[in-house]
Structures are given as C-alpha cells and as structure tokens.
Image (cartoon, grey):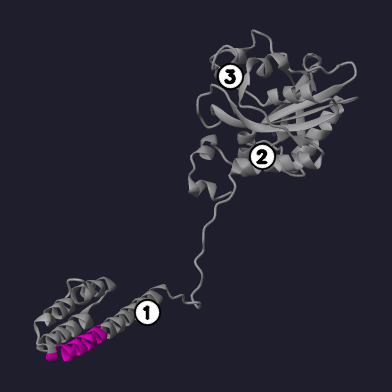
Amino acid sequence: MLQLDEMLKNAESEISSASHMKRIEELKVQYLGKKGELTQILRSMSSLNPEDRPAAGKAANEAREKLNVLFENAEKIISNRFIAERLDKERLDVTMPGKKHVIGHTHPLTQVIRKIEDIFIGLGYQIAEGPEIESVHYNFDQLNTPENHPSKDEQDTFYFNAETLLRTQTSPVQARVMEKNRPPIRIICPGRVYRSDEVDATHSPIFHQVEALVVDKNITMGNLIATLKLFAKELFGESTEIRLRPHYFPFTEPSAEVDVSCWVCKGKGCPVCKNEGFIEILGAGMVHPNVLRNCGIDPDIYSGFAFGLGVERTAMAVFGINDLRLLYENDMRFLSQF
C-alpha cells in the first residue's frame, strides 16, 4: 500500500508538470508499461499472504484507474493549450486592410505583338506559325534569294550545317502556307528570328518580326498602301502618315521601304527622326512572281503583297524607349512602366 501511495504521489507530480504530449507518452510507459512501476508492484504481490492479496489487488486497480484519469486530464489540458496557442497565432483580424499582391503583366514586346495581331485579325487575317530551325530551302531558295545575296553569308546567318539554319526572317512561314493552301490567303506571321548582329542600342542577334502576306486575284500596290495606312494609324495614332521609298528585296517586286511620320514631332522634324519628319519601320512590296511560282501558285492568275516589321523597334516607337537592350534585361523597374 505504501508503494502504491508513493507511486501515485510521484506520478501526479510528474504528470502535472508535463508540458507536451511526448512527455505524457514517456510517463505512460514509465508507470503503466510492461516494465512500468505499477506492473512491478503487481508482480511483487505474489509474495503477500493469501489473505492480504484481495485488498492489495483492489488497491492496485484503483491506482491504475487514478493514473488513467491523471493521464486523460493532462492530455486534455495540453491539447487545449496547443489549440489556444495556435488559434492565437493564426487568428485573422478582419478589420485590418488586406495585403496587396503584386501581379505581373505582359511584356512590352508581347503587348505590341498582340496589338498587331488584333489589328489584322479584325481585317480578316489568320495567324500562321512555323519552325525557328529552318531549312535553307524555305529560308532562302523559295523566296527567290540569289546565291550571292549577302544574307546567305555565314557572317550574317547562324547555320547548323549546309542545309539547316536559324531562320533569319518569318518569311519561310509564308512559303510554307502558300505551298499547302490555295488563294485567297491572308496571314500574318509573328515570331522570333536570328541574325549575326552585334548587340547595341538598336540591334540584337535575337529579335521578333511580324510579317503579313495577302495573295488573291487582282491584288495591287493600291491594296498594299491602303493596308499600310490603316495599320499605321491603328498602331501609332490617327494622325500618322506613311511614306514609301523605292527599295530592293529579292522576294518582292516592286519593293519599298515604308516610313511613318515621327511620333515625337508629328512630322515636323526633330533629333529622333533626324529632322526628316519620318522614321523607317518596315519593308514591303508586291510578291515576286518567282516566289508565287516556286510555291505552286500561278502568277498570271494571282498576285499579292507582303510586308514585315521588327517588333523591338516598333515597341521602342510605341513606348518611347531609346535602347533595345532594355527590353531584354528583365529589370522590373523598367518593365513595370509599361
């Protein structure tokens, strides 16, 4: 009896001072386990006189029940304390203002590409895409590029081998579309292109182009000019004017460089446009008969026009950016302005 009383006294003291569940589990093993103190006392009862065993057994069972009650109460106290602490830490003050989550937005180049796509989709054009790793056949040969053309030189173009390269323009997409589809054709071809240029304020070896192609019966230079006028006004503003200057491209004939009135001085002349009032933005022309013929389209029945512009320079014009490299540096202080 004295052993049981002493054990209960010690157990009650240790259980009440336990501060976490792990300690409670350790005490359970200490007092109620197979080698615990109560088990040892029960085993020692075999040495008692037979007439004393019933009373000792009853006292041992009462001690077990008291221990179970002590453990149960201690577990409830620790559990309630843990829940209260967690609720206190995780409580939400609904009167506090919410925290603003900063979300990103589309890159300036993507914004310009989408704006151009929206303009031409509204005119009934479709978007066409093609591979960036292209064949010499589609990048040059189908586009009527002569063998001695400077763009074929290894100093201007990234070659994998004699037959494969990184496309220098999105024009190969036009050739692929013309091979697989019969006129009427109205498409734009946005995408990345690659040229061996040194990185500076206006050049990059990787940049983006959007090219357009229309092939149908009775397509004339007048259709091209009207389309360019509408496109320039939609992209740069209603007051924008265009100017065409004769030029040479192997895949169009006649060909022209297309300028738009300066968005800074509105055509009056300033340092940005070198006091000319106009800034070059794209090349254009009527699709060369050889290109149509190479793609299986009869140039005696069909004609077409094509033009292409660099997205980076267009973005610089739209947003007033003076250095192309800023578009690729991923500086949030810069990009967040647009």
Asked if residue 46 lies left or right of residue 66, the reply is: left
Asked if residue 333 lies left or right of residue 111, the reply is: left
Give coordinates of residue 109: x percent, y percent.
61, 40
Q: Nearer the viewer, mark 1 or mark 3?
A: 1
Do labels 1 and 3 touch, CB within 8 Å?
no
Is 62 within the magenta?
A: yes
Label 2: how many Cα within 10 Å (few below 14, some 14–19, many 20+): many
User: How far apart are the alpha carbons under marks 1 and 3?
Assistant: 67 Å
**Mark with earlier residue (2, 3):** 2
Main secondary-structure element of the magenta-colored stretch: helix
Check disc 2 and give the amino acid type.
Answer: Ile
User: How far apart are the alpha carbons under marks 1 and 2?
Assistant: 55 Å
User: Secondary structure beneath disc 3?
Assistant: strand
Magenta highlight range: 51-67
Residue at the disc numbered 1: 84
Residue at the disc numbered 3: 165
Which image quadrant: the N terminus?
Answer: bottom left
Check disc 3 and give the amino acid type.
Answer: Leu
- Return the mark for residue 125: none
Is 301 within the magenta?
A: no
- Taking depth in this image into account, of 300 and 281 the one nearest to the observer is 300
Question: What residue is shown at x 24% (from left), y 87% (from top)?
Answer: 66
User: Secondary structure beneath disc 2?
Assistant: helix
Residue at the disc numbered 2: 113
